[in-house]
Image (cartoon, helix red, strand yellow):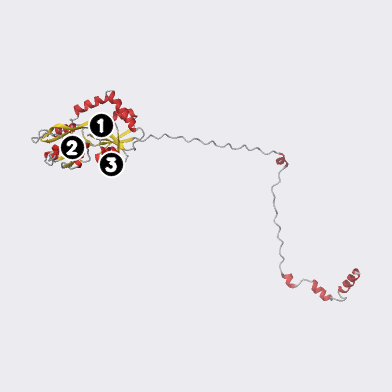
Amino acid sequence: MLRILCTIFLFFSWPGHGFIGEDDYLEWNEPSEVASELPLKKQEAEPEIKGPPKKSEEEVKKPKALIAPVPKKKKEKQKTVKKTPSKIIIALPHNYAPYSYIGKDGKIKGLYIKLLNEINMRMGDKLKFEAMTFEKGLDLSKDGIVGLVGLYKNKKREKIYDFSESLFSESIALYTRAGEEFDFDGFSTLRDKKVGIVKDYSYGDQFDKYKARKYFPTRLGKDENDLFDMLIQKSVDVILCDDIIANKILFQREIGGKVTKLNRLISNMDIYIVWAKDKAPKDFFKDLNYNLAVIQTNGVYSKILSHFIRTSFMDD
């Protein structure tokens, strides 16, 4: 039945038989003028998809070369450079002749440096010596920056410093103007005297107590030479000075006829090397005291001291 219907439709659809005229058919099948005028687009060629290059049979058969693993570089041990340990600085007075002072050649001279050089040599050259004012040495030593040579011991200082064994003992005497001598019988004798002393010096616990109580008036000098000037100029009545230092000043300045030493010493004062409490380098005092004892027992100390006493009054 379906086949019959399709045949009938095709018959009437043919030009001249029914639904579509011959003209209509031609018009419907011919391309329009507008369509004929449009340029035809060229079909672009589809891009060729390239795959990996084909390997030849020889390459396929040829085995891959084995790549040797790169050996790991061993870490080189860094060479440790041994640092030279910094030296321990010891401060000495720069104007305390003949014990410690700067010579004409700019080097430190005196008894202290001669003894310390012997000790330092036996310690393995650990020490470095610097000359400075006494005031500066005190400031730096209190902060634990340097050790300081030349301090007397008293109760106040024992709270601040650790002390070495005694390096030397100085004899403190009283000096007055010639013709004005008096018998010294204890510090009560100085009741009405103006006493000259060096600034920041201690002359022992007993003297320091009288000074603190203002039992007698005191005048301060910058050093021992200054004290003798004050005495001659009558700014003070009496001065305190180490015996060896006084002999050097009197000899060099030729003022022995103007000054007289009183009949007795005030005291023998031990001299120490000090460092701020608990701040000294490790084993410093142990090594120092040991080697000081060595030169005291082997005769080196007594030789240095004998030569010092014979020549202490001379110029550099």
* Left or right of 261 in this view: 96: right
Name the amino acid type tagged 3.
Answer: Asp
Distance from Cα at disc 1 to Cα at disc 2: 18 Å
Give the amino acid type for the residue marked by disc 1 in the picture: Tyr
Secondary structure beneath dot 2 equals: helix
- Place of residue 285 in the rendered image (x, y in percent of width and height, measured from the top left): 32, 32
Depth check: 48 or 313 in front? 313
The residue that appears at 26% across and 26% down in the rendered structure is 301
Measured as percent of width and height from the top left, residue 237 is found at: 12, 39
Label 3 Cα crowd, 10 Å radius (few <14 / some 14-19 / many 20+): few
Q: Are marks 3 and 2 in contact (CB under 8 Å)?
A: no
Q: CA distance from mark 3 to mark 1?
A: 20 Å
User: Does the image show residue 158?
Assistant: yes
- Quadrant position of the N terminus in the picture: bottom right
Residue tagged 2: 224
Nearer to us in this view, 37 or 282: 282
Q: Amino acid at mark 2?
A: Glu
Mark 2 closeness class: few <14, some 14–19, many ≥20 residues within 10 Å: many
Q: Quadrant of residue 216?
A: top left
Of residues 15 and 103, which is closer to you in this image?
103
Q: Is residue 133 visible?
A: no
